[in-house]
Image: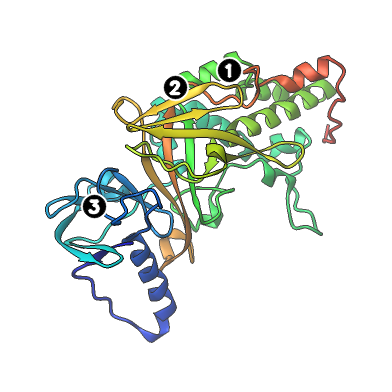
Amino acid sequence: LVCMYVTALVPMLVADNIDKVRAQWTDILNYHTIVFNSTDNPMSEIGGNKYYKTKHGGEVMVTGTNVGAQVLSGAQIDNGYPASNIEAVYNMDNGNSYQIDHIIQGPVESVYKVLESNPDKYSKFLELCQVFDDNELLDWAGISTVRDEQTGIKESDRYKVFDSQDSKCLDQNVVFFNTYNYTVYAPDNDAMDIAFSRGLPTKDKIDNWYTNYSTRDWAVDSAYRCLNIIRDFVRYHFQQVSLYADQTVHTGEYNNEFSTFLVDELGISQKLNVTGGGNKINVVDNAGVTHVIDANNTSKMVNKMTRDFVFDDVLTNASYMTTSSFAVVHELSEPLYYSSDRRYDKSFLDMSAGAKSHKSTYKR
């Protein structure tokens, strides 16, 4: 356990706001505490690796081991916040404590913001993520956007990727994140072109059916299948547990397998096999293709820290954070394949082979 002590932060505790103050202080303390993996340095010292997970699933980047080294997180790396410089090191029985001159500042960009702010890289991926925001299109395709009175759930909730959380977030949050830490393998525009060439539907194709063939059963059925293919593709690129390309990558147990948000018809999460080291992560998909994420490649976005916040009120009136989810974004130059044949249009091939067609209900 390593505690990064903050030297000069004394809040004024107001009785009426004690719960809010406690929540924010807990977040600060968690951000300044690193929990080491059992295979880390046995003395629980920073060094060797560059990235370390904090107690609540965030991440810090450490540039050295002694006085003069720096500890940084997202806002300090990307948004110009002052670095946290190590001023003193205290050897303790259960680890080391480091005195720093600035509070550690976590990411102030969401996953959505990172994708939206880099259209030269991610405009095509983001466009597919946002196709599920069109309620009229979803209803036409047979995906209900009406909340079920008994369950309180809308069928369309199983498709959406981003949502504004009633404006109680920075911009838009990933709807299936849940106060944990995650990895986003973001295919860049070249990777998306590869995916389209292998059967991934485009938004333009669905829009054409909706605009010109809205009364045709085959168009509705095709749109439904395409939307499900897109959902599967997108969710396969979101993984449970954040992994950073570093000297040592702690991939854990279960044969280095990590669950994605793509769930098959049996309710089983599809896995990725991830190993790493030498500042690289090797991601093996269901087609057996190895995707190498290399932190030494400065032309690619690697180890980008993000945080999806949920506030107590709309952003302009918010006084504190109620919860959050951390994620790291890695750029991919080739998409992940969830099918062994590297195709995304399997449902259409199944249909041509006699599979049962989707029976949708829609307004003509």
Determine whether the residue tagged by mark 1 lies in a helix, strand or loop: helix
Q: Give the answer, above or below, for where 12 lies relative to 163.
A: below
How crowded is the residue under tag 3: few (<14 C-alpha within 10 Å), some, or many (20+)? many
38 or 339: nearer the viewer:
38
Name the residue at 26% across, 54% down: 45
Residue 1 location, quadrant:
bottom left
Residue 223 location, quadrant:
top right
Which amino acid, by three-letter code, is at mark 1? Phe
Which amino acid, by three-letter code, is at mark 2? Ser
Name the residue at 52% across, 56% down: 179
The residue carrying mark 1 is: 196
Which numbered mark, 2 or 3, is in the foreground of this view? 3
How crowded is the residue under tag 1: few (<14 C-alpha within 10 Å), some, or many (20+)? some
Q: Residue 333 got which mark?
A: 2
N-terminal-most mark, 1 or 2:
1
31 or 46: nearer the viewer:
46
